[in-house]
Image (cartoon, rainbow, N blue to C red):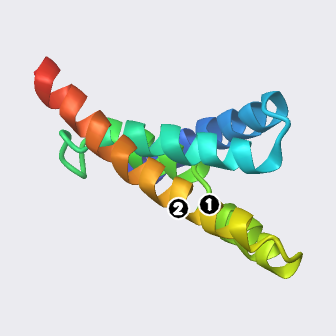
Amino acid sequence: MSELLLVGAGGVLGAWARYLLGQRVERRLLDTLAVNVLGSFALGALLALPATHPLSLVFAVGFCGAFTTFSTFAVETVHAVETGDRRLAVANAAVNLLGATVAVAAGATLVAVLS
């Protein structure tokens, strides 16, 4: 039960942060990119913790799970295809996937260097 509460607490914080960032970044694709890259960086940094560590449950599972948004990225990419903007769709997919992957590696590397 305590693990569920930790994940839930992180999820609430992540959802709030996602909403607030979306309000600050007014361009639809950019807010999704920002949360996915920032969340991936945080998740990469959290890789140093065991999966069952309380901080991992709060931040990796809860916060990052609620903060990042793979489904919105997918919907926005499909919408670009449906509206005939295939270049935007390809660019959105490439930048999100590459950006998130590089961010995970950067977060993990930063923690390794600082440890």
Residue 1: image tag: none
Residue positioned 81% across, 73% down in the render? 79
The answer to whether residue 42 shows anywhere in this view is yes
Dividing the picture into quadrants, the one containing residue 47 is top left
- The amino acid pointed to by label 2 is Ala
Q: Residue lying furthest bottom in this view? A: 82
* Spot occupied by residue 39 in the image (x, y as percentages of width and height): 49, 42
Instruction: Give the percent coordinates (x, y) of residue 71.
Output: 65, 68
Determine whether, in the image, residue 14 is placed left or right of residue 115: right
The answer to which image quadrant residue 76 occupies is bottom right
Residue 44 coordinates in the image, percent (x, y): 31, 43
Residue 1 in view here: no
Q: Name the residue under label 2.
A: 94
Q: In which quarter of the image is the N terminus?
A: bottom left
From the top left corner, tell me how far across and down residue 86 is, in percent. Answer: 73, 74
The residue carrying pointer 1 sits among few (fewer than 14), some (14 to 19) or many (20 or more) residues within 10 Å by Cα, namely few
Q: What element carries label 1?
A: helix
Residue under label 1, please give it: 91
Residue placed at 20% from the left, 40% from the top? 49
Q: How crowded is mark 2: few (under 14 residues within 10 Å), some or many (20 or more)?
A: few
Relative vertical location of residue 62 with respect to residue 114 in this rendering, above or below: below
Residue type, mark 1 in image: Ala
Q: Which residue is drawn at 71% across and 36% down?
A: 16
Q: Which structural element holds mark 2?
A: helix
Query: Badges 2 and 1: C-beta atoms under 8 Å apart?
Result: yes
Q: Quadrant of residue 58?
A: top left
| Closer to us: 96 or 87 | 87
Alpha carbons under labels 2 and 1: distance apart: 5 Å
Residue at image x 50%, y 43%?
37
Residue at the limit of the structure toward the top, as seen here: 114
Residue that sits furthest to the right in the current view: 83
